[in-house]
Image (cartoon, rainbow, N blue to C red):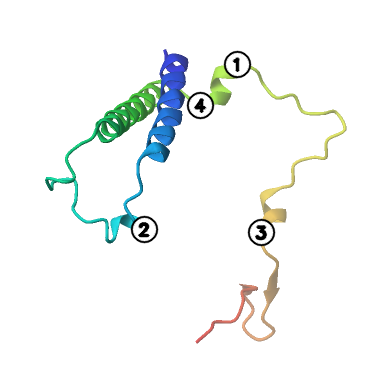
Amino acid sequence: MQNVVLVIHLILALFLIGVVLLQRSEGGGLGIGGGGGVMSARGAATALGKLTWALAIAFIGTSITLTIIAAEQSATGSVIDRLGTEVPMPENAPPVPAPSELTPPVESAPDSGPVVPLVPPRAD
């Protein structure tokens, strides 16, 4: 199901790109100086305009459908859980370090006695 919707989605994307490129340019970029808008008498929907809207609505519909399908499939677990195999540890792998070896170094203050972690100086 997901593959069928994905193929339709890709075909719609290609057709949408083609239809937009076929439309007549009206001058300024981003519609500036185009004279009239979509709602004006001159801007009445042409065949390419209607086709563009239809393809755009279908593209959004397939996008939402793919999102719903992906959300339903991911609700069951992660991709690694679906594999069902355990990753074997190599025999010559180094041992995992203890958590105390992964913490930042500490330095003891000479007069105060307690151990103070090394931190960068404050900016203020």
Sequence-wise first label, 2 or 1: 2
First in residue order: circle 3 vs circle 4: 4
Q: Are marks 3 and 4 in contact (CB under 8 Å)?
A: no
Viewer-proximal residue, 89 or 27?
27
Percent across and percent down for residue 86 are 67, 21
* Residue pictured at 43% horizontal, 35% vertical: 17
Disc 1 element: loop
Disc marking residue 78: 4
| Residue type (three-letter) at the residue carrying disc 3 | Thr
User: Marks 2 and 3: in contact by CB < 8 Å?
Assistant: no
Q: Amino acid at mark 4?
A: Ser
Q: Are marks 4 and 1 in contact (CB under 8 Å)?
A: no
SS for tag 4? loop
Q: Assign a secondary structure to mark 3.
A: loop
The quarter of the rendered structure image containing the N terminus is top left
Distance between the alpha carbons at the discs numbered 3 and 4: 30 Å
Residue that badge 3 annotates: 103
Residue, disc 1:
84
Position of residue 124 relative to residue 66, above or below, is: below
Which residue corresponds to the image point at 41% horizontal and 18% vertical from the top-left? 5
Q: Which mark is residue 75?
A: none
Across and down, in percent, residue 79 comes to: 54, 24
Give the class, few, some or many, for how many residues have Cα within 10 Å of label 2's Cα (few <14, many ≥20): few
Q: What's the mark number on residue 29?
A: 2
